[in-house]
Amino acid sequence: MTHLTAFNLSIDFPLYHSESRSLKKALLGKMSARFGVDKKSRPTVQALRDISFSLKEGDRLGLVGSNGAGKTTLLRTLSGIYQPTMGSLSMEGKLVSLLDPGQGMNMELSGRENIHLRGYFLGLSKSQIRYLEQDVEEFAELGQFLDIPVRNYSSGMVVRLAFAMATAFPPEILLMDEWLLAGDAAFMTKAKARVEGMVRHADILILASHSASTLAEWTNRLIWLDNGQIRADGKPMDVFEAYLPRHDFEELLRGQQMANL
Amino acid sequence: MAELAPPDSTLRTLKTPTRFALSADRGWGQRFGLAFVDLREGASLYRLIWALAFSEIKLRYRGSAIGPFWLTISTGIQIGAMAFLYADLFHTVIKSYLPYLAISLILWNYLSSLVVEGCTCFISADALIKGTRMPLMVHAVRTVLRNTIILAHNIIVVIVVLVVFQVKQSLFSLAAIPGFALWLIDGVFLSLLLGAICARFRDIPQIIAALMQVAFFLTPIIWQISALNGHPAAQHLIEMNPFNFILSVVRNPILGLPLTSTDIFGALGVSAAIVIISLVGFARFRGRIAFWV
């Protein structure tokens, strides 16, 4: 049974300036404390505060919020990259996260070599790696570029390769950041078709995006993050009504009605 | 658009664990538990580690005609140049000195790069660490493996020297194998510890590199331990040098030099200390490394 539960998740991000990070500063800091100068506590950013939610099969959660609200940090935490400062996280299901396009790729290696590395990382068998290679080759349409270093790709080509690699095997829990929605129109259509297919297969989807229409279309629950806290949590249109400026919300509403007709 | 449809769900064979739970720090029990999970999952990714280490070597020499064999050539030149000078300075015969210097130096370069590059094993993998959940052990093992591949290229120099200078090999030479296994274990664990500390304090790699320079002169590599005869104080210091024990357990069998029980127990003791301290340190810092890199 696929599920994902976050309970009181909090993340404090340590801030290490170039100076405070050095050993000298740490040693001298101890020294000066001994001399009675008031000891500065370590500066941190409260990236996430008391995030709790629970998702079960069929849930498609959207994340909205201004830049720096904690969307990416939350996705990284849910991927298991950051250990929470407080709270806990539990899930069941195969998880794939699409956090940033260059993720896990070695820019010096060719696209094909990166596909193989990905296959090893996923623990695939030889035939599965062949399948992955074939699937990516067809989908990303990089042609001869697949055999030259990724460093020579245009940014759109990197997105195509990364997207194709990440979506070749449909996961049970899919985490996506908004970069996916940057690409040329032809690829976008293709990517959307594939994501829609994946969304139907993925039991749980979590999507962070600034595009209200995408979120309204793909999600059935929306969380509004503000300064690392949950400001609102509910049905997409209800949350958008509070989150979006009046004018934008009315436009979204009109768009929805058009689509329903 | 049929080919755009996602592959059918029978292909959901990703080996990633389907159950995953992570909570805030709950003390040492949880820390050790998570550290052991990291080691176990890292070990299961051996194909990835192998491919990563090989690709790094390949990249370094991409476009070069003889590729990684430049390593072999530069080691050969370094040893040739040093041997004749120092044999003269130390008043020793080149026939016994050159094999000693060649093997000591090659092994030392390996040990030294295990320590120095172990420091940057997490810093240099920051994109991977922040991009996906991957056992951190992968980065430690890959650093050790990369340096071992470089050592393997230098084996040619060792063989040429052993043959040309007719260093007798016997069954005793095989004692170098368990010694080398000990080095691999030490290398991985030390990388886990140093990699974490150096990710937090960016000055440490430079300090370690400087200390390794000092260790190079304090360890019998370019000079032989017999040079200390008549200097009891210095001899005492050398007997306390952990690098001396570690180096002896691999070098002495290859050169047919005696291996004392002090060397063996010294090397085992040093390795046990490295493994225990590194395990505790890694368990303590593991959860913070993603924030530090």
Image (cartoon, coloured by chain):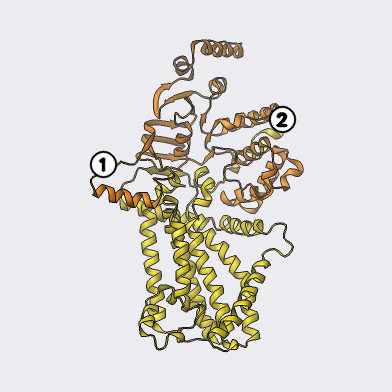
Chain colours: A orange, B yellow
Residue B203 or A32: which is nearer the viewer? Answer: A32
- The residue located at (56%, 81%) in the rendering is B86
Work out which quarter of the rendered image holds the C terminus of chain A and state it: top right
Residue where numbered disc 2 is placed: B1
- Circle 1/circle 2 CB separation < 8 Å: no
Chain of the residue where label 1 is placed in the rendered structure: A
Chain of the residue where label 2 is placed in the rendered structure: B
Image mark for residue A133: none
Left/right placement of residue A210 relative to residue B81 reads left
Instruction: Give the percent coordinates (x, y) of residue A3.
Output: 44, 36
- The residue located at (55%, 39%) in the rendering is A171
Residue B115 or B234: which is nearer the viewer? Answer: B234
Q: Is residue B246 visible?
A: no
Work out which quarter of the rendered image holds the N terminus of chain A and state it: top left
Compared with A51, B272 (above or below) is: below
Residue where numbered disc 1 is placed: A38
